[in-house]
Image (tube, rainbow, N blue to C red):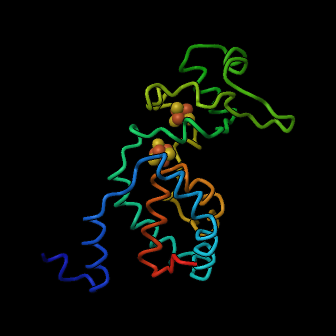
Amino acid sequence: MLILAFLAPSDYLYHINTLQKQPIQDLQQIAILAAERLEENDRFALQVKANSADQMDAVVHRINKNIEQKIDCTLCGNCCRSLMINVSEAEADSLSSHLQVSRASFDDTYLEKGSNGMMLMNAIPCTFLEANRCNVYEHRFEGCREFPAMHLPGFSKRLFTTLMHYGRCPIIFNIVEEMKDEMGFEREG
Ligand code: SF4
Ligand code: SF4
């Protein structure tokens, strides 16, 4: 009660609303809604861009704290099932050593290499995904640790890529929907 007494009325309402709301986690439902909301999300992107980057980061980070704790990634695993992961030399060294295989064998088995030296995991879903869990979790790649990056600064700069994953990642989907509510976005075109 003491804490709520220091919140502005809009913060208080936000607190109550987000505590009550349950995020949508059904991947099929999210994919359908995402396909329906392409134009809506383009309009929402314009509204985001009209605000300062710092303001948007503050909103996203606050909503993320709430959504993140309601979504269990081990029940989803959709990013590991559908994204191609970048791998650095240092990451390949570290994981090959953890798996106790030579770097050459690791590269042959798991990696695809571009002519520009870029390395990617060669399988989608990722080879290391087992029953929605990463079996090399402590040694997973930087890209895996960061995704969906809603805790990082620079949301406005990453808006295009974030919205690309809106139909794939329940965390992104629910944060964006919560932002639309909070920012008074008009959903009807
Ligand atoms: S390494 Fe682990 S966290 Fe990364 S994509 Fe593969 S299964 Fe997912
Ligand atoms: S980060 Fe998103 S897509 Fe990946 S497992 Fe968690 S909720 Fe699913």
Quadrant position of residue 111: top right
As displayed, is residue 39 above or below residue 97?
Answer: below
Residue 92 placement (x, y as % from top left): 65, 28
Q: Who's the residue at 28% across and 71% down the image?
A: 17
**In which quadrant will I find the C terminus?**
bottom right
Q: Is residue 140 visible?
A: no
- Is residue 186 visible in the rendered structure shown here? yes
Task: Work out which residue is located at the far left of the displayed protein and give it.
Answer: 1
Nearer the observer, 80 or 97: 80
What residue lies at 42% left-to-right and 68% top-to-bottom?
178
How many marks do you count on the picture? 0
If the image is split into quadrants, where does the N terminus sit?
Answer: bottom left
Name the residue rendered at 55%, 53% in the picture.
Answer: 167
Q: In the displayed structure, does residue 2 sit left or right of residue 112?
A: left
Where residue 84 appears, as percent x and y from the top left, is: 66, 38
x, y percentage for residue 152? 52, 60
Residue situated in front as seen by the camera: 7 or 72: 72
Q: Is residue 86 above or below residue 98?
A: below
Can you name the residue that lies furthest to the bottom here? 9
Going 41% across and 77% down the picture, which residue do you hit?
182
155 sits to left or right of 9: right
Above-or-below relation of 103 to 184: above
From the viewer's side, name the closer residue of 188 and 123: 188
Judged left or right of residue 153, residue 9 is: left
Frontmost residue, 66 versus 180: 180
